[in-house]
Image: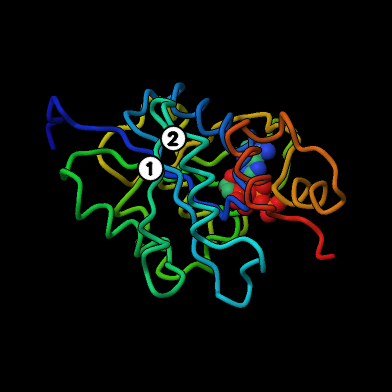
Amino acid sequence: MPKRNGARRIGILGGTFDPVHIGHLRGALEVAEQFRLDELRLVPSARPPHREAPQVSAEQRLAMVELAVAGVEPLRVDDRELKREKPSYTIDTLESLRGELEVDDQLFLLLGWDAFCGLPTWHRWEELLLHCHMLVLQRPDADSEAPEALRNLLAARSVNDPQAIEGAAGQIGFVWQTPLAVSATQIRQLLAEGRSVRYLVPDSVLTYIHAHGLYRAPN
Ligand code: ATP
């Protein structure tokens, strides 16, 4: 299909963002710049109600992501998974997004290598590439092999130069990135111990966490 002049390039990064931190944000920004994305949407996922941390609601996780990306081009927040009654499958999110885009808009699903290797367990996983390309974030030191179930897919769909990915969907590119050594688990632990997380999250998120007394150990 000929590329419309106005075809957009949109990336999506799902996660629980509990809370969002500089690892997510730097990684997202680097991919957005490298791939000249018009938008990179952070998509907070719903969790089964019994798994929600007692003090931190989905609304609060969303509020923190909104604060983190406010005014930072081309990062955005997409709250569609939180608006649903139940946790969404990625295929549902992609179908819903596709319904809002032009047919030639390019959609890039960002996935860590570990998540990519687990793909064959995902609901309707073989349909995902009908809707998006995949950018698999690889660590430079990673040496694990893809599972057998993905070998054919990789042979058919992976490209040597992810910058040259064309079309609206259907290809797999690998992006080598050294992640910052920070995780939401580490941040929750530090806060539960009453320690500082300054510089691990944006200041606006830090202020929100303290204002709402989030992630503190129960007295
Ligand atoms: P938790 O510690 O609670 O498991 P997390 O910090 O890994 O959380 P998620 O919300 O699970 O955060 O991550 C969402 C996405 O961001 C995932 O694709 C994950 O690979 C990526 N990500 C998480 N931490 C980093 C990091 N430090 N650098 C780059 N990407 C990251």
| Residue 108 against residue 14 in the figure, above or below | above
| Residue named by callout 1 | 171
Residue 99 location (% of width, % of height) = 20, 55
**Amino acid type, callout 2:** Val
Q: Quadrant of residue 210?
A: top right
Which one is nearer the viewer's eye here, 49 or 168?
Answer: 49
Label 2 sits on residue: 159
Is 210 left or right of 176, judged from the image as shown?
A: right
The residue lying at 54 percent from left, 68 percent from top is 47
The spot of residue 118 in percent (x, y) is 59, 61
* Residue at point 44%, 28% (across, down): 32
Query: Which quarter of the rendering shows the C terminus?
Result: bottom right
Location of residue 205 by image quarter: top right
Vertical arrangement, residue 8 with respect to residue 66, above or below: above
Decide: marks 2, 1 in contact (CB < 8 A)?
A: yes
Between residue 213 and residue 88, name the one nearer to us. 213
- Which amino acid type is shown beneath numbered disc 1? Gln
Q: CA–CA distance between discs 2 and 1?
A: 7 Å
Query: In the rendered structure, which disc, 2 or 1, sits on the residue that comes first in sequence?
Result: 2
Local packing at callout 1 (Cα closer than 10 Å; few below 14, some 14-19, many 20+) is: many
Relative placement, left or right, of 88 versus 97 is right
Where is residue 172 drawn, in percent x and y? 44, 42
Q: Secondary structure at mark 2?
A: loop
Count numbered badges in the picture.
2
Q: Residue at x 44, y 35 (%)?
A: 159
